Image (cartoon, coloured by chain):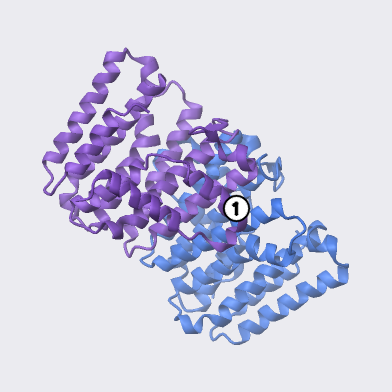
Chain colours: A purple, B blue
């Protein structure tokens, strides 16, 4: 079993090696800029950890893992645009539209989504593309709610905006490792819970969302309960889930 | 053989019947608004005409045809945004960002691209998704050139921004009808030429692009030559290509 850090290194190396469509020309710089911005790669690492825990080959999972990170990055680039959150910084650097201009950033986001699909379609399994694109649509729907229905159900908003791509990270790993459908349930439950956990902790760190509506101890309990359910889900899984448990802990106790 | 007008009706009916991801919620209105804006549906009609000329079932081609129209519509919605062309009208109506706001229009464009992939992946043929997404990337690269390299090679720009999705309209039709790879060449040549033809005529009608750089008779000759090469390509195709010839004529002689 590779440790989480090794999986992360594999993701980084693979992302650097991805060849983008030559027709993008110099727009490629904007794609690489946003991809190389030092994120935690939690989605692709989760995907690869599932592949390995389920008995698959980590190398075989790399295109799916990278596709997840590209979809995530596409969403960040578009969310940062003036049309949406108008954030001028992302992880301590100028966001894409500040570095390259609004038009190129918009197109870079579009291209990241299209390149994600191109990676996902390298598998001989249409279900991989389907699951990725359905999660993407849920994420877009979540972002739409976020800008139009600020008083809506926050747990549902998180499930759409963040949870579904987390769930797809687990789902794509299962499909790469060819885990039979009837055996996927506990893994997928783990995916749902870790997505919720990630977003609740995010709100705690940012002091917004759920953290602005509920008392601190209640938010902390939401997170603890999700972490507990994530661990329980893994109890029903056969295979070495040590790395997945470690990842769940790192999400639960992260500080940034 | 169905006539072009019948194919167009089939496309319209199918587009109205497409069920979008429920997670999009009310954003669906923005997708439908842009899809129902009365375009000529030239890409999906070309796709279906190829399916039928090559001996396939028109009904089987409808998801691919619709996917092409969704990709085209995604590109229009994003191109109209203030970040790019900042066009407030599209086909005599307020453009998406004027009707719904910049943020929703951005997300609607993203969702149209993702929904196009969802339609393309309903086929048990990864090559359909691959060809669609590669054409999409070329189109994005073309748009990037358009905003960053105004003095560049216009024929190459058109090939990327418009030609590749036209070529994919033919290509997807061939794949739906399961035309063997060695037999695809003349069809694909037709696709290249009709894409070029469409854009040259577009420039003539708008008085920009090639029409602003070359004398009128030279631009007209470019169009005539492309139309002639498109017809010649069809001569090498077995099957009833009458509808495709009619479509080529309607592109060559269109007035709006």
Q: Mark 1 sits on what residue? A: A27
Q: Quadrant of residue A187?
A: top left
What residue is shown at x 72% (from left), y 76% (from top)? B227
The image position of residue A25, as x and y in percent, is 61, 58
> Can the viewer see residue A159?
yes
Q: Tell me if A201 is positioned left or right of A249 in this view.
A: right
The image position of residue A165, as x and y in percent, is 36, 42
What residue is shown at x 76% (from left), y 72% (from top)? B223
Q: Quadrant of residue A126?
A: bottom left
Give me the chain letter of mark 1: A
What residue is shown at x 38% (from left), y 60% (from top)? B122
Q: Tell me if A84 is positioned left or right of A192 in this view.
A: right
The image position of residue B216, as x and y in percent, is 87, 67
Give above or below for A211 relative to B8: above
Give above or below for A89 relative to A1: above
Q: Secondary structure at mark 1?
A: helix
Question: Who is closer to the viewer here, B99 or A249?
Answer: A249
Q: Tell me if B9 is positioned left or right of B157 in this view.
A: left
Category of crowding for the residue at label 1, using alpha-carbon neighbours closer than 10 angstroms: few (below 14), some (14–19), many (at least 20)? many
> Can the viewer see residue B113?
no
Q: Residue furthest top?
A: A215
Q: Which quadrant is home to the C terminus of chain A?
A: top left
What residue is shown at x 58% (from left), y 82% (from top)? B186
The image position of residue A1, as x and y in percent, is 19, 51
Q: How many marks?
A: 1
Give above or below for A17 relative to A231: below
Question: Who is closer to the viewer here, B218 or B25?
Answer: B218
């Amino acid at each position: 079993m590779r440790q989480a850090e090794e999986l992360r290194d594999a993701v980084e190396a693979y992302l650097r090696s991805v060849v983008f469509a030559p027709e993008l020309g110099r727009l490629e710089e904007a794609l690489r800029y946003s991809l190389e911005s030092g994120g935690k790669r939690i989605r692709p690492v989760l995907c690869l950890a599932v592949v390995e825990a389920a008995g698959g080959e980590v190398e075989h999972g790399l295109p799916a893992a990278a596709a997840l990170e590209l979809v995530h990055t596409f969403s960040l680039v578009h969310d940062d645009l003036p049309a949406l959150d108008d954030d001028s910084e992302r992880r301590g650097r100028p966001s894409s539209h500040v570095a390259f201009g609004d038009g190129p950033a918009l197109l870079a986001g579009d291209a990241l989504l299209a390149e994600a699909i191109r990676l996902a379609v390298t598998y001989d399994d249409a279900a991989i593309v389907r699951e990725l694109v359905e999660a993407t649509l849920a994420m877009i729907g979540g972002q739409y709610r976020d800008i139009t229905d600020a008083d809506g159900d926050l747990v549902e908003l998180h499930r759409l905006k963040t949870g579904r791509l987390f769930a797809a990270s687990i789902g794509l790993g299962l499909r790469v490792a060819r885990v039979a459908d009837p055996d996927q349930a506990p893994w997928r439950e783990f995916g749902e819970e870790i997505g919720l956990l990630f977003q609740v902790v995010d709100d705690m760190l940012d002091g917004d969302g759920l953290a602005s509506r509920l008392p601190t101890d209640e938010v902390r309990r939401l997170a603890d309960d999700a972490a507990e359910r994530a661990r329980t889900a893994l109890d029903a899984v056969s295979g070495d889930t040590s790395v997945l448990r470690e990842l769940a802990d790192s999400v639960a106790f992260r500080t940034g």
